[in-house]
Image (cartoon, rainbow, N blue to C red):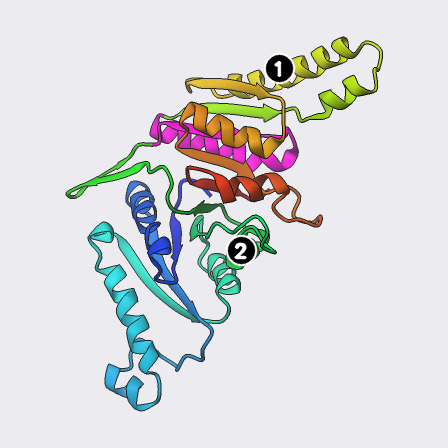
Amino acid sequence: MYPFKNILFSTDFSPLSRSLLKYAAAFARHHNARLYLHNAQEGSLPPQVFRLSERALSEHGYEWLVAVRQELDELAQNELVKGLDVHILLTEGVAANEIVRVAQEHQIDLAMIATQRRGRFERTVLGSTTETVLAKINCPVFVSRQPVKDFVYYRGSETTIALNRILFATDFKPFDNNARDLALQLAATHGSKMIFMHAIGTFMGYIRSVSLTETEDMEGRIREDATNRLQKLAADAPGTDSEVVLREGRTYDEILEVQKETDADLIVVGTGDRHRGNPLGNNAERVIRNANCPVLVVPS
């Protein structure tokens, strides 16, 4: 999984998805990785689609494919990917399913997906493609929407990944382990400060409302245990500048608040248990929808 050797940039050619090319190119350049530029079409594709001339495509009713190929070629010639090991993939099928399939087939270590922010009353809070991919894919997924805080900068041929602060939010569950490890590896590579955070939740108010005895002692023990766990995470990352943050409140709200307060460049979260109902978990889902920076979602 790390260092990244194969990176997938899947695009629908929208301005939103194109905005992620800078991140894909930067990580590919830094890791000397192969970069796959991918587009999926639900329409039927002819055999050897890249070997057919534009005239042959037009004569056989594939005029729309001419534009698709041109879009992919333009991406492959973009200054951002100049000098990289770039491979173009055009596949047939539903985008989400194709992203998952391509990721497995090409042993992708990092996939890049742009997502739309949906209204609070819509049926889904994420784009359906993003939801499906995150539910099924077995590699980390870098998710972003616009506008968000950037941490990749280009000056001529020089690329800078200014990943100064990484926020890792944890529930202390085993499914967070892969996310924790990847966050630490990124921090070590880019000299980032690690912010370890946990939100206790809103049950403290419930405890008070039912007037349980020794409430203060119970609260103190819970906070002490959570603080000790966070400090152990920091202690297990020697040489890394670390900070621990313990909050009380709804987890996703606190993650978003801590990101703003610390000006974190990247949030790293685990997907939770994908074998139970919601594959993302409400926390990751809401964080992706509302975060002011990119989110790296790591499967358990």
Residue displayed at 54% across by 19% down: 245
- The amino acid marked with disc number 2 is Val
Regarding residue 52, the answer to whether it shows in the image is: yes
Residue displayed at 51% across by 68% down: 94
Range drawn in magenta: 163-191
Instruction: Specify the quadrant of the image occupied by residue 254.
Output: top right
Per the model, the C-alpha gap separating discs 1 and 2 is: 35 Å
Reply above or below: 98 against 190: below
User: Quadrant where the C terminus lies?
Assistant: top right
First in sequence: mark 1 vs mark 2: 2
Instruction: Specify the quadrant of the image occupied by residue 45.
Output: bottom left
Residue displayed at 33% across by 43% down: 27
Identify the mark at residue 228; answer none if there is no mark.
Answer: 1
The single residue placed furthest to the left in the displayed view is 156
Reply above or below: 251 against 95: above
The single residue placed furthest to the bottom in the displayed view is 59
- The amino acid marked with disc number 1 is Asn
Q: Position of residue 192 (x, y in %)?
A: 38, 26
Residue 109 lies in the magenta stretch: no
